[in-house]
């Protein structure tokens, strides 16, 4: 069921698949009619646009970009303002899984690439989004100047299991995203800009599917009290909540959506 819960301009990175794609669909479902979506390839963006075909009054700007490149990020947000005039909702979601090897086996290049995309990319996007939102009028305590959600992970709060597959680069990168969201979430709250992190557990995305082709991770998914991995749509609904007026008193938080995995 569609609604007008959200009313404004949105920007989503990593929108060509997985959580980003589902979040884009959810934002439109709940009222957004002007949205810019970005990804590394046009193919993924076209697939997301196809899912929204037939939505009345929808305007979509598709942008092929690399969030780890400052010039790409700056240009993408400038395009948003040029076309739509403002920015109300931002989801900094683009990310990679990182090299699943313990520290003593990890190459520096793999660690740095994970940090560049999963952490620096979020920082670059958030910096430019804040510059835009700060110039906008404050619409009051329920709406403010805008809302930003950063995709972290449950592994931004805890470590990977000691008996499982070690992924220190990813854990470090996502802890940094949580830290950035908390620091900026508290600093910019008084300016009417709400910033929060979303911390999903295991989600059935293309990245997870690519490393679980033989099903070896199914037992890990089942450790969540809900007994399964999440569907991307379930994470998207939580993102919509954090962006919406329903979360008007939520700032600097790290919202865990992991089926109870980290609760015991």
Image: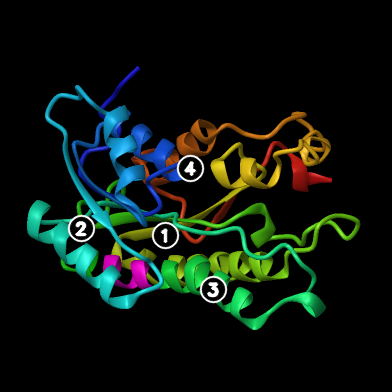
- Which residue is painted at 76% across and 37% down in the image? 214
Looking at the image, tell me whether mark 2 or mark 4 is earlier in sequence order: 4
| Residue that protrudes farthest toward the top in the picture | 1
Reply yes or no: does residue 146 show up in magenta.
no
Measured from the top left, where is residue 153 in percent x and y? 61, 54
Q: Main secondary structure of the magenta part?
A: helix
Mark 1 or 4, which is nearer the eye? 4
Q: Is residue 102 left or right of residue 87?
A: right
Comparing labels 3 and 1, the label whose residue is closer to the camera: 3
Q: Which residues are magenta?
A: 124-130
Q: Is residue 227 above or below residue 84?
A: above
Which residue was labeled with disc 3?
113
The quadrant holding residue 127 is bottom left
87 or 138: nearer the viewer: 87
- Above or below residue 107? Residue 185 is above
Left/right placement of residue 147 relative to residue 140 reads: right
Q: Is residue 125 magenta?
A: yes
Q: Which mark is residue 138?
A: 2
Q: Position of residue 46 (x, y in %)?
A: 28, 39
What residue would you read off at disc 4? 19
């Amino acid at each position: 069921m569609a609604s007008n819960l959200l009313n404004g301009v949105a920007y989503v990175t990593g929108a060509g698949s997985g959580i980003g794609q589902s979040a884009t669909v959810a934002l439109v479902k709940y009222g957004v009619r002007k949205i810019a979506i970005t990804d590394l390839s046009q193919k993924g963006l076209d697939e997301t646009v196809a899912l929204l075909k037939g939505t009345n009054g929808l305007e979509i700007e598709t942008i092929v970009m690399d969030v780890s490149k400052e010039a790409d990020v700056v240009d993408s947000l400038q395009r948003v303002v040029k076309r739509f005039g403002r920015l109300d909702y931002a989801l900094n979601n683009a990310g990679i899984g990182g090299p699943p090897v313990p520290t003593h086996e990890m190459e520096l290049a793999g660690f740095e690439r994970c940090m560049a995309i999963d952490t620096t990319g979020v920082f670059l996007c958030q910096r430019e989004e804040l510059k835009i939102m700060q110039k906008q009028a404050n619409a009051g305590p329920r709406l403010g100047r805008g809302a930003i959600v950063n995709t972290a992970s449950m592994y931004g709060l805890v470590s990977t299991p000691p008996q499982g597959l070690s992924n220190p680069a990813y854990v470090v990168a996502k802890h940094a995203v949580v830290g950035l969201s908390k620091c900026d979430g508290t600093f910019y709250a008084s300016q009417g800009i709400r910033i929060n992190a979303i911390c999903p557990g295991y989600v059935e995305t293309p990245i997870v599917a690519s490393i679980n082709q033989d099903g070896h991770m199914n037992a890990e998914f089942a450790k969540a009290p809900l007994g399964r991995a999440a569907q991307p749509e379930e994470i998207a609904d939580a993102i919509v909540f954090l962006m919406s007026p329903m979360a008007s008193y939520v700032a600097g938080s790290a919202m865990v959506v992991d089926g109870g995995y980290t609760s015991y």
